[in-house]
Amino acid sequence: MTAVDEVAPNVFRATGTDVNVVILQDGDALTLVDGGYPGDVGAIENAIRSLGRRPEDVQGMLLTHAHIDHMGALASFHQRFHIPVFADPTEVAHARRDYLEQATAKDFIPMLHKHGVLPWLLRVARAGATKPLAIADAQAVLYDGPLDLPGAPVPVATHGHTSGHAAYHLPQHGVIITGDALVTAHPLSKLRGPQLLPPVFDHRHGDAGAALEHLAALEADTIVPGHGPAAFMPIADAVEQARDRGR
Ligand SMILES: [Zn+2]
Protein backbone atom coordinates (compact mmCIF):
# COMPACT_ATOMS: atom_id res chain seq x y z
CA MET A 1 0.00 0.00 0.00
CA THR A 2 1.30 3.44 -0.87
CA ALA A 3 2.12 5.64 2.12
CA VAL A 4 -0.07 8.72 2.37
CA ASP A 5 0.69 11.60 4.78
CA GLU A 6 -2.12 13.84 5.98
CA VAL A 7 -0.21 17.13 6.05
CA ALA A 8 -3.28 19.20 6.99
CA PRO A 9 -6.96 18.25 7.54
CA ASN A 10 -8.13 16.55 4.31
CA VAL A 11 -4.87 17.37 2.52
CA PHE A 12 -2.77 14.32 1.70
CA ARG A 13 0.70 13.91 0.20
CA ALA A 14 1.27 10.69 -1.74
CA THR A 15 4.51 9.81 -3.49
CA GLY A 16 5.43 8.44 -6.88
CA THR A 17 9.00 8.03 -8.12
CA ASP A 18 10.79 10.86 -6.23
CA VAL A 19 7.80 13.12 -6.88
CA ASN A 20 4.73 14.16 -4.89
CA VAL A 21 1.03 14.02 -5.63
CA VAL A 22 -1.40 15.96 -3.47
CA ILE A 23 -4.93 14.73 -2.79
CA LEU A 24 -7.57 17.13 -1.46
CA GLN A 25 -10.62 15.56 0.11
CA ASP A 26 -14.06 17.07 0.65
CA GLY A 27 -16.50 14.40 1.84
CA ASP A 28 -16.52 11.71 -0.84
CA ALA A 29 -15.03 13.96 -3.49
CA LEU A 30 -11.37 14.47 -4.33
CA THR A 31 -9.11 16.84 -6.22
CA LEU A 32 -5.71 15.65 -7.42
CA VAL A 33 -2.81 18.07 -7.77
CA ASP A 34 -0.17 16.58 -10.10
CA GLY A 35 0.11 12.91 -10.95
CA GLY A 36 3.67 11.52 -10.85
CA TYR A 37 5.33 9.68 -13.76
CA PRO A 38 3.37 7.43 -16.13
CA GLY A 39 4.70 4.43 -14.16
CA ASP A 40 3.34 5.90 -10.91
CA VAL A 41 -0.32 5.52 -11.85
CA GLY A 42 -0.74 2.32 -9.80
CA ALA A 43 0.83 3.97 -6.74
CA ILE A 44 -1.48 6.99 -7.05
CA GLU A 45 -4.49 4.75 -7.48
CA ASN A 46 -3.46 2.82 -4.33
CA ALA A 47 -3.07 6.11 -2.45
CA ILE A 48 -6.63 7.08 -3.41
CA ARG A 49 -7.96 3.66 -2.40
CA SER A 50 -6.12 3.87 0.95
CA LEU A 51 -8.39 6.86 1.70
CA GLY A 52 -11.41 4.66 1.00
CA ARG A 53 -12.06 6.38 -2.31
CA ARG A 54 -11.81 5.45 -5.99
CA PRO A 55 -10.26 7.30 -8.94
CA GLU A 56 -13.82 7.94 -10.13
CA ASP A 57 -14.31 10.12 -7.02
CA VAL A 58 -11.78 12.63 -8.36
CA GLN A 59 -13.76 15.65 -9.59
CA GLY A 60 -10.89 17.55 -11.14
CA MET A 61 -7.13 17.36 -11.54
CA LEU A 62 -4.73 20.31 -11.36
CA LEU A 63 -1.38 20.46 -13.04
CA THR A 64 1.32 22.68 -11.52
CA HIS A 65 3.21 22.27 -14.81
CA ALA A 66 3.30 19.88 -17.73
CA HIS A 67 6.54 18.00 -17.04
CA ILE A 68 6.30 14.24 -17.43
CA ASP A 69 6.92 13.61 -13.70
CA HIS A 70 3.76 15.58 -12.85
CA MET A 71 1.38 14.43 -15.62
CA GLY A 72 1.39 10.60 -15.32
CA ALA A 73 -1.76 9.70 -13.38
CA LEU A 74 -3.54 12.81 -14.67
CA ALA A 75 -3.18 11.69 -18.29
CA SER A 76 -4.24 8.16 -17.38
CA PHE A 77 -7.28 9.13 -15.25
CA HIS A 78 -8.29 11.73 -17.83
CA GLN A 79 -8.30 9.05 -20.51
CA ARG A 80 -9.94 6.32 -18.42
CA PHE A 81 -12.49 8.30 -16.40
CA HIS A 82 -12.81 11.57 -18.36
CA ILE A 83 -11.88 13.62 -15.27
CA PRO A 84 -11.16 17.21 -16.33
CA VAL A 85 -7.61 18.58 -16.09
CA PHE A 86 -6.88 22.23 -15.26
CA ALA A 87 -3.70 24.27 -15.63
CA ASP A 88 -2.42 27.80 -16.14
CA PRO A 89 -3.56 29.16 -19.56
CA THR A 90 0.01 29.01 -20.92
CA GLU A 91 0.63 25.58 -19.47
CA VAL A 92 -2.46 24.22 -21.27
CA ALA A 93 -0.47 24.46 -24.53
CA HIS A 94 2.53 22.81 -22.87
CA ALA A 95 0.32 19.92 -21.69
CA ARG A 96 -0.90 19.60 -25.28
CA ARG A 97 2.78 19.41 -26.30
CA ASP A 98 2.49 22.33 -28.70
CA TYR A 99 6.04 22.84 -27.39
CA LEU A 100 8.23 21.14 -24.82
CA GLU A 101 10.12 22.93 -22.04
CA GLN A 102 11.67 19.87 -20.47
CA ALA A 103 15.23 18.64 -20.03
CA THR A 104 15.95 15.57 -22.16
CA ALA A 105 18.48 12.77 -21.61
CA LYS A 106 21.22 14.66 -23.49
CA ASP A 107 20.97 17.59 -21.05
CA PHE A 108 22.16 15.22 -18.32
CA ILE A 109 25.22 13.89 -20.21
CA PRO A 110 27.57 16.58 -18.75
CA MET A 111 26.34 15.59 -15.27
CA LEU A 112 26.75 11.83 -15.59
CA HIS A 113 29.97 11.74 -13.56
CA LYS A 114 28.17 13.30 -10.58
CA HIS A 115 27.11 11.09 -7.74
CA GLY A 116 23.59 9.75 -8.07
CA VAL A 117 22.81 11.06 -11.55
CA LEU A 118 22.98 7.76 -13.45
CA PRO A 119 20.93 5.72 -10.94
CA TRP A 120 18.33 8.51 -10.92
CA LEU A 121 18.16 8.58 -14.74
CA LEU A 122 17.68 4.80 -14.83
CA ARG A 123 15.02 4.94 -12.12
CA VAL A 124 12.97 7.65 -13.84
CA ALA A 125 13.39 5.96 -17.25
CA ARG A 126 11.80 2.87 -15.73
CA ALA A 127 8.97 5.10 -14.45
CA GLY A 128 8.28 6.27 -18.01
CA ALA A 129 10.28 9.53 -18.15
CA THR A 130 10.83 9.22 -21.90
CA LYS A 131 7.29 8.18 -22.78
CA PRO A 132 5.53 10.64 -25.09
CA LEU A 133 2.58 11.97 -23.13
CA ALA A 134 0.14 14.79 -23.82
CA ILE A 135 -3.20 16.01 -22.51
CA ALA A 136 -5.08 17.39 -25.51
CA ASP A 137 -7.84 19.26 -23.71
CA ALA A 138 -6.69 20.62 -20.36
CA GLN A 139 -8.74 23.66 -19.33
CA ALA A 140 -7.30 27.02 -18.31
CA VAL A 141 -7.70 28.19 -14.69
CA LEU A 142 -8.52 31.80 -13.89
CA TYR A 143 -6.40 33.66 -11.35
CA ASP A 144 -9.34 35.11 -9.47
CA GLY A 145 -9.92 33.09 -6.34
CA PRO A 146 -10.84 29.55 -5.35
CA LEU A 147 -11.69 26.97 -8.00
CA ASP A 148 -15.01 25.16 -7.79
CA LEU A 149 -13.35 21.86 -6.86
CA PRO A 150 -13.03 19.82 -3.64
CA GLY A 151 -10.62 21.62 -1.30
CA ALA A 152 -11.27 24.98 -3.04
CA PRO A 153 -7.66 25.44 -4.26
CA VAL A 154 -6.62 28.95 -5.32
CA PRO A 155 -4.25 29.07 -8.32
CA VAL A 156 -1.16 31.28 -7.89
CA ALA A 157 0.88 32.21 -10.98
CA THR A 158 4.49 31.13 -10.38
CA HIS A 159 5.93 31.21 -13.89
CA GLY A 160 9.63 30.41 -14.22
CA HIS A 161 10.28 26.68 -13.82
CA THR A 162 8.08 26.48 -16.93
CA SER A 163 6.42 29.42 -18.70
CA GLY A 164 3.01 28.59 -17.21
CA HIS A 165 3.90 27.07 -13.83
CA ALA A 166 1.20 27.51 -11.15
CA ALA A 167 1.13 26.84 -7.41
CA TYR A 168 -2.10 26.12 -5.51
CA HIS A 169 -2.97 27.78 -2.21
CA LEU A 170 -5.42 26.42 0.37
CA PRO A 171 -5.92 29.55 2.50
CA GLN A 172 -8.35 27.82 4.90
CA HIS A 173 -5.56 25.43 5.98
CA GLY A 174 -2.53 27.68 5.42
CA VAL A 175 -1.22 25.18 2.87
CA ILE A 176 0.72 26.05 -0.26
CA ILE A 177 1.33 23.42 -2.94
CA THR A 178 4.43 24.81 -4.62
CA GLY A 179 5.03 22.30 -7.45
CA ASP A 180 8.59 22.83 -8.70
CA ALA A 181 8.74 26.58 -7.98
CA LEU A 182 10.18 25.60 -4.58
CA VAL A 183 11.11 22.08 -3.45
CA THR A 184 12.52 20.58 -0.24
CA ALA A 185 14.70 17.79 -1.66
CA HIS A 186 15.66 16.17 -4.96
CA PRO A 187 17.80 13.11 -5.75
CA LEU A 188 20.20 15.38 -7.72
CA SER A 189 20.62 17.86 -4.84
CA LYS A 190 22.70 17.41 -1.68
CA LEU A 191 20.61 20.03 0.14
CA ARG A 192 17.72 19.27 2.46
CA GLY A 193 15.00 21.82 3.12
CA PRO A 194 13.60 24.66 1.00
CA GLN A 195 15.54 25.11 -2.24
CA LEU A 196 15.25 25.69 -5.97
CA LEU A 197 15.66 22.74 -8.31
CA PRO A 198 19.04 22.29 -10.03
CA PRO A 199 19.13 24.68 -13.05
CA VAL A 200 19.07 21.85 -15.62
CA PHE A 201 15.34 21.43 -14.87
CA ASP A 202 14.34 25.06 -15.28
CA HIS A 203 13.20 26.45 -18.59
CA ARG A 204 13.55 30.14 -17.80
CA HIS A 205 15.78 31.02 -14.87
CA GLY A 206 15.00 34.71 -15.11
CA ASP A 207 11.44 34.54 -13.82
CA ALA A 208 11.99 32.21 -10.88
CA GLY A 209 12.57 35.29 -8.69
CA ALA A 210 9.14 36.75 -9.49
CA ALA A 211 7.54 33.37 -8.77
CA LEU A 212 9.18 33.35 -5.34
CA GLU A 213 7.85 36.87 -4.66
CA HIS A 214 4.32 35.62 -5.33
CA LEU A 215 4.80 32.65 -3.01
CA ALA A 216 6.36 34.72 -0.21
CA ALA A 217 3.32 37.03 -0.16
CA LEU A 218 0.93 34.19 0.75
CA GLU A 219 -0.38 33.24 4.18
CA ALA A 220 0.85 29.67 4.51
CA ASP A 221 2.92 27.64 6.95
CA THR A 222 2.51 24.16 5.48
CA ILE A 223 4.48 23.70 2.28
CA VAL A 224 3.86 20.73 0.03
CA PRO A 225 6.44 20.79 -2.77
CA GLY A 226 6.65 18.83 -6.01
CA HIS A 227 9.72 17.01 -4.69
CA GLY A 228 10.73 16.29 -1.08
CA PRO A 229 8.83 16.12 2.22
CA ALA A 230 6.32 18.68 3.42
CA ALA A 231 7.86 21.59 5.34
CA PHE A 232 6.14 23.24 8.28
CA MET A 233 7.33 26.86 8.35
CA PRO A 234 6.09 30.20 7.02
CA ILE A 235 6.38 30.24 3.23
CA ALA A 236 8.16 33.62 3.40
CA ASP A 237 10.93 31.99 5.51
CA ALA A 238 11.16 29.05 3.11
CA VAL A 239 11.50 31.43 0.15
CA GLU A 240 14.26 33.33 1.97
CA GLN A 241 16.14 30.06 2.66
CA ALA A 242 15.81 28.94 -0.95
CA ARG A 243 17.10 32.32 -2.17
CA ASP A 244 20.04 32.33 0.25
CA ARG A 245 21.12 28.89 -0.82
CA GLY A 246 21.06 29.87 -4.48
CA ARG A 247 22.00 26.87 -6.53
ZN1 LIG B 1 9.21 17.92 -11.12
Image (cartoon, grey):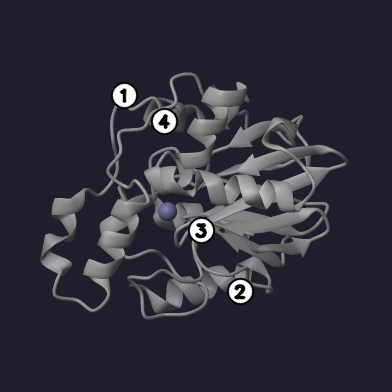
**Can you tell which quarter of the image residue 82 is in?**
top right
- Tell me which residue sits at (45%, 58%) in the image: 17
Task: State the residue position of label 4.
Answer: 95
Front-lying residue, 168 or 243: 168
Mark number for residue 170?
Answer: none
| Residue 60 in picture, x, y percent from top left | 67, 31
Mark with earlier residue (4, 2): 4
| Residue 84 in picture, x, y percent from top left | 61, 24
- Tell me which residue sits at (62%, 68%) in the image: 230
Of badges 4 and 3, the one in the foreground is 4
Task: State the residue position of label 3.
Answer: 212
Confirm whether residue 175 shows in the render: yes
> Relative to residue 46, is residue 196 depicted above or below?
below
Number of marks in the rendered image:
4
Question: Any atom of ligand 1 within 8 Å of the CB at mark 3?
Answer: no
Q: Distance between the residues labelled 4 and 2?
A: 32 Å
Using residue 162 as the reference point, say whether residue 122 is left or right of it.
left
Confirm whether residue 205 shows in the render: no
Task: State the residue position of label 2.
Answer: 237
The amino acid type of the residue labelled 1 equals: Asp
